[in-house]
Image: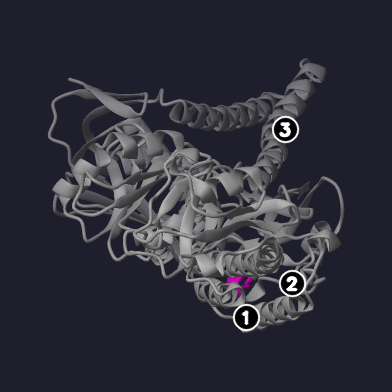
Amino acid sequence: MPFFSRSADLPHNPDRWKQALEAVLEVNDIASSAAALPNSIHAMLGVAVGLLGAEQGSIMLMEDGGTTLSLVASHGLPQEVPLGHRLTVGESVAGRVLATGKPLLLGDVDRDAFVNYVPKARSIASSVVVPLRVQGRVIGVLNLATAKPSSAFTEEDLRVAQLFADQAAGVIHRTSLHERAERRSSDLMALVEASKGLLGALDIESLLRHILDGGTRLAGAQDGFVCLFDTDTGAIDRGVFRGFDKPAIRAIMSHSKVQHAIDYTEVAYVQHDFPQSLAAVGIRTGRGTRGALVIAPDPQLMTDRGDLLMAYGQQCASAIGAAELYSVIERKESELASIIQAVPNPIVLVDSRARIVALNPAAEGLFGVSASFSAGAVVTGTLGNEEVEQLLSGEGELQTELIAGSPAHTFKVRVTDVRVPGAPMGRVLIMDDVTPEREMAQTQRDFVAMIGHELRTPLTIIRGFARTLLNRIETASPAESLEALTTIDAKSVELARLIEDLLYVSKIEAREAALKFEEVDIGSLCNAVTDDLIQHHQDREVMLDIPGSLEWPCDKTKVGLILRHLITNALKYSGAPDPVIVRVTSEDDELRVDVIDKGEGLVSSDIPHIFERFRQLDSSSTRERGGTGVGLYLCAQLVKVHGGRIWVDSTWGKGSTFSFSLPHRALGRKVVHLRGPQAQQTA
């Protein structure tokens, strides 16, 4: 920095040159001492007083945007002019100099020449009043005075004073800027420290505590509170309170300035309406949630940190908005996770690098892997199913059927690309277990094949014998005609029974079958069914173990149908000379019928499915013996509509015992019609 900027203002006297240079060097020493600005200004005033030999001196600086002068340093002034004394620009001598920017050399001051001139206790014989100038802008005034006429100042003194003032003004300006920068840096660091607690806090309750802690730290406060309002009622919904009771909070929140700050998201100061001064910051999130931060600040700190408190309020609003959004996302994610976890279909999600992101419990069970341990693993080689892994590693929408799991199930598989906003592409695979549908379809195909075979067999025989009679109607002997007609009759009865069984199945599934309950002689019924069946098995024997005179309320026709199917199966799957035994017992109001054979028996894996519709054991022996697969299903359904139960006890290679039981019904004459989900009884 040049010592002297304008040669026209330089002193003419070499001694004054020396004195001015020494004074400037002292000013530079003061500037380099890093002393606080008030101390530096007092030190420079002392140098100026010594430089001109003044008895009094003062430095006044401009404040309030250039409208007032404030006394910041004084030497020898009377007590009625304390530090902090203010003048309006244009008033008194200093105000005139500041307004005009021109120095004044005065003798005895004409009080009437200056507005609001402040008279001194001692008369002033001479004074110099010079502006403090920085880059052409006046920032204050240096005033030096003496009461001794013999020490009156000269034009040379005025030049020296102005040179000194210019150097001092530069030091004051730079020191002021430096202190302001340091203070601003300190304030910004305070804002940073206050805002640290807001980072990463996504729980609303925890975030509100951090907001209050940061706000009180920023404002140098001990007490305060932060609250959020219900969007519907406007009442306080949640908050954190420190040092304020409910009546005080209610009074503060109803204050007009606080309400204005909340409504317009501003900072309001309330200084005289409560025991302590308050600062209120309005908060509003992007989702429309309103709130307020109210603290009792340190007045000195808040003078410089009012704008920082506003910035802090905006950061709080952003943090609360983020917490609200996180809460919504977390809830949606929880709902989605709950839905996915509850879905019975296996679901697998992978990212753009074919790494596993998630599996639901159904997928864990199917592939025998853990979602927590598999997360992040490359899908290839992890699931243990090459087809599934290839689908997840591929591209585009794919759909297929495959077999997976143990025991093996058939799945319809759909896989497609998915994209989440802001995230790379991934793939999701959903598997529908279609095993029952495929088994049913196969069962229906098998049934169609079986029923075609079972219907074709008697029809072929009937047609063959009928054609034979037609071709030999004139030559056939009575014995041959009788044999043909007998065969036709037997096969037509067999065909009628087959069709009857199918019709019963249809009626039962349509809930249209009717039961006619009456007292039935069980022994006579078993004898009639057995006599009819044994005619077709001349080499077989059926033994009846039935108590004499046993009557039971049931539908005679339907129970007879049950007996016919069970005895027929026993005869079909066992051989001579072992008899089929039909045992009937009654105990505790329950009728029990056992049909026992010493035949092939059943494999244990077939027993749970033996009473299913159209079920046929998949072996060559069963196909040799024929059957439609509806007999045992029909028995089970007829027993069920009687309110009874049916079961089988069988060992492979040792024979089977098919049993059913019927409860006793106290009735006159009742008919049960199966219509709709429940049976209706008619007396």
Which residue is disc 1 drawn over? 30
Residue type, numbered disc 2: Gly
Name the residue tied to disc 3: 456
Image position, residue 45 (x, y; %): 55, 72
Looking at the figure, which quarter contains the N terminus? bottom right
Label 3 sits on what residue type? Arg
- Quarter assignment of residue 489: top right
Q: Main secondary structure of the magenta part?
A: loop
Among the two numbered marks 2 and 1 on one chain, the one whose residue lies closer to the N terminus? 1
Is residue 369 found inside the magenta-colored segment of the image? yes
Identify the residue at image location x=41%, y=57%. Answer: 302
Range shown magenta: 368-372
How many marks on residues? 3
Label 1 SS: helix
Q: Residues within 10 Å of mark 3 (few under 14, many from 20)?
A: few
Give percent across and percent down for residue 514: 35, 24
- Residue 489 has which mark? none
Measuring from the top left, give residue 598's x and y in whole percent.
47, 66
* Inter-mark Cα distance, 3 to 2: 48 Å
